[in-house]
Amino acid sequence: MVHPAYWRRGYGSTIAKWGVDLADIDGVDQGVLATSIGADLFRNVGYRPITDLHVEGDERDPEGVTFAALKHTAKAKGSGIGCNVI
């Protein structure tokens, strides 16, 4: 999460790309839940949308909030260091 004072400077994309690079090195897939702003960022670094989820609101936030579930599939599955659960 990037503080709003630092939005639109590339920090969020840099962090997300770093996570994608690490996942590719380790050969693991990643999933994220993001609001609309975050979902756009993750799509731009290669995540693909899976579905949208809506959480109903309450008296403080009657509209609720919608999240996008997105997934990054590692480019080099199983080629990195990891552990296998048997």
Image (cartoon, rainbow, N blue to C red):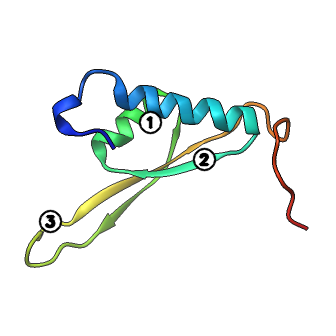
Q: Three-letter amino acid code at disc 1? A: Phe
Residue at mark 2: 30
Find residue 18 and name its label.
none
Residue furthest left as drawn: 59
Residue furthest right as drawn: 86
The image quadrant where one finds the C terminus is bottom right
Q: Is residue 6 left or right of residue 33?
A: left
Residue at 19% from the left image edge and 72% from the top image edge? 57
Residue at mark 3: 63
Lower sequence index among marks 3 and 2: 2
Using the rendered image of the protein, determine whether residue 46 is visible from the camera's viewpoint: no
Residue 74: % across, % down: 70, 37
Q: Is residue 16 left or right of residue 55?
A: right
Query: In the rendered image of this protein, does residue 77 appear above or below residue 61?
Result: above
Residue at 62% from the left image edge and 29% from the top image edge? 21
**Is disc 2 placed on a helix, strand or loop?**
strand
Instruction: Measure the C-alpha gap from mark 1 to mark 2.
Output: 11 Å
Q: Residues within 10 Å of mark 1 (few under 14, many from 20)?
A: many
Lower sequence index among marks 3 and 1: 1
Label pair 3/1, CB-CB below 8 angstroms: no
Instruction: Measure the C-alpha gap from mark 3 to mark 2.
Output: 29 Å
